[in-house]
Image: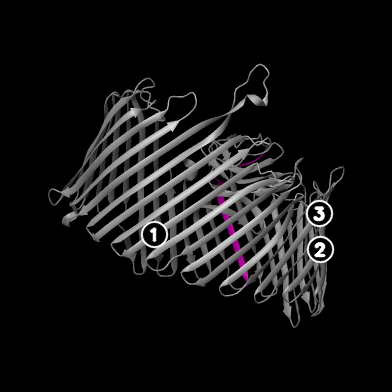
Amino acid sequence: MVIFLFFADSTWVDLSGEKVINLSLRRILSGSPPGFYPYFYRDEHLSLKIKGSLYGRIELEGEIYQGRLPQEERAGVTGRWSWGSAFLGDFEGNMGNLVVGKRLRGIKGEIFPRILFLSGFYSILRGKHELERFSGDGTQGPFELLHSSIIVGSERVRVGEGLSLELMERGKDYLMDYERGRITFKRIIKPEETVEIEYEYLEEGEGRVLYGVDGGIKTKILTLGYSRVKGGFHEFHGGIEYKGAGVSGRLSLDTLFHRSWSLTGKIKAGWVSMDGGITWADSGYANIGKHIERNVRGRIGLNPFEWMRFSGDYARREDTEEKGWSYEVKYLGYSSRIYSGSKKRRVRKVYLRYRNFEIHAGREERDTLAFNTVGGKLSLRMLSFSMQAGGEYRKGKENEWEGNISGNFTRSIFSIGGGVSIILSSIRLHGDVRFTPLKFLRAQGRYEIETRRRDSLPFKVHTGILNLTFNPSFLTLAWRPSFRLMKNEEGFTPQRSWSNVTEVGLSPWRFLNTGYVDERNRFYYLEENGRLLQDNREERNNWRLRFSPSGGISCESGISRGKRRGIFPRFFPTEEDTAGDTVTVYEEEEKWLYYTGFTLIFTEGRRIKGRLRFEDYKKEMPDSVPYDYRTLGADGGFFAGITSFLSMGMDLGYEYEYGIDPRVSKIEEVRVGRLLSGISFSLTGFEYFRADAGFREKRSFIDSRQVLRETRLELRSSYENFELTGNLKHTHSFSPDYSTLEAKAGVRIRF
């Protein structure tokens, strides 16, 4: 529903919005249900949007939002005309570069006749400003803040070490409980890290009054302005800009009463360009939410010839300093950058570039650490090559080397590549190949050798991967073998692993497709004396067949098998407590599943489904009662319309388990029958109402007595712009005995 109000010709107001109320309830009626937690939650909001026009000259636009929490409230309406605008409501007040508050409530406006501009506001601070700093404790939180009732969206959170604080993003980096005043991070905050959070909170009593004004003159080359806010805060801001033949520049000056000023400038004349700025302020002063610091920055660039370029820059903020310079003559360049502060660092780099060729070298120094690098890259039509090498040096420690060299040659159907990497005194060689002779035939492979020399007993690790795929229109064949083995210098192989995946898919007709996947994995580990200590084998097989002769008939059958067996080390201490007391034990687990099912869809939404399944499960473990049981199951159901407005569905299933199941009994064989039944109704066909109801029961008998009943009811009613929803779910269990209730209700009114 949309409300139009007409007052006169070309004067109208359009109102639209919604009111939403949601209630959620979870209650334990009896017993102690596992994993169930009771709660009650109420959420509501009102949203109203306004659009309109006054005499066809002033455009109106506004919004009113009221949430469950006072901090979520906001309202405002804007009027715009050809030479100005006015706003009434909640806003962020900024006069020039003065940040006077993030949450203000009042009126503001601006006018800009010709070269003049004038703006001002009169408001009440919605919240009081607070700035907190604290250190992490090795957890994610939650961390308690000094105040509660925090205004939603008013916080700015920074985290880091020393002065290197990074701005965090709500939802991505942290979660905020505005009502209780708690913040929880999505990562651990280390004790050496500092958390700085700036926010506004509501307090009882009348808010503080603020008013301000900003005005001045603005032309193409000159801008002058003056801002003043209640409390003695005033600022002068101005600038001069000029653009001419080969010369352009701008100079800006901002002063914040007698305690802060900033001067920035930028000029470009021919082959010379410069920009920079200076800001000074009392470091102990904060301007209602904005902390002003001392900083200096500058940059100069010289480009006297097409083949020569030079640049230098300098920046200082508090006790952190950064300076650097670089030059390039034709294809040769050099750069140097120095960072000083809590962590001193110097980075230098020299490079040579010519078309598709580049070589470079560099050095980084940080306290007792030095790291040298050298590298290059070459890119041709079919060949690419890159190299990177480096050495790390620490005082009092062994030097460490790392680097990599790689190359690649590519043709339309063929690609071959390789490389060598040195990481922490370990060497890794690898080769890659790709071959695609036909559109439906593809082969890829990779072989890698890694030599680890940091250990007391150096060894090599070999890894190989192959992927062959043949995929014409109706057939899919794939083979993906891989292996990994470890050898020491004496040729002894203590660890080996293999993996092999074979996949076959066939779809000769649109209504028939089948597939088979076979996966086998093995891992074993030998002691130095050759005794087998660990041998794990895993096999998985899956076959399926799907037949759909028409849009209303679908049948699917399948067989899956999973088997895991292996020898695992187990330690049994004796009086001497030696390694000879470690023995190997055998464990085995196997599961077979056979199933077949169908779905029939008739006219008017009628459908029938059914499935048969058989499961065979075995598991053996040392000093434990083995699992050895079989399960037969059948389930089916139908869904059909009884009348034009009422539909009904029924589900019925039964499974029978027999054998040894320690979950039921650890002494003797068990027999367990489980009956699964359910019924559901859907009331549709009405223009304004829909209802769904259902009941399910799972009953176990013979050697296990357990009954689980679930009743649900869902209602939805809508009439024009009114909508009502409800959801009710009751669960009752016997052995264990418990009962729970879950309910949800919601109202939405649109206007």
Query: Mark 3 falls on what kind of element?
Result: strand
Expressed as whole percent of the image width and height from the top left, the position of residue 265 reads: 76, 67
> Horizontally, is 608 left or right of 629 in the view?
left
Q: Which residues are magenta?
A: 115-133
Left or right? Give the position of 687 relative to 57.
Answer: left
Circle 1 is placed at which residue position? 505
Q: Identify the mark nearer the N-term, 1 or 3.
A: 3
Residue 336 location (% of width, % of height): 83, 62
What residue sits 60% from the left and 36% below the top?
A: 532
Residue underneath mark 3: 391
State the residue lying farthest toward the bottom.
245
Label 2, label 3: how many angstroms apart (C-alpha)? Answer: 12 Å
Q: Earlier in the sequence, mark 2 or mark 3?
A: 2
Distance (Cα) linking label 2 and label 1? 52 Å
* Label disc, if present, on residue 281 of the rendered structure: none
For the residue marked with disc 2, what is the amino acid?
Answer: Ala
- Residue 145 visible? The answer is no
Instruction: Residue 361: give its label.
Output: 2
Residue placed furthest toward the top: 575
Q: Residues within 10 Å of mark 2 (few under 14, many from 20)?
A: some
Q: Can you tell which quarter of the image residue 302 is in?
A: bottom right
- Examine the residues drawn in magenta and state their main secondary structure: strand
Marks 2 and 3: which is nearer the front?
3
Q: Amino acid at mark 3?
A: Gly
Does the magenta-highlighted stretch encompass residue 180? no
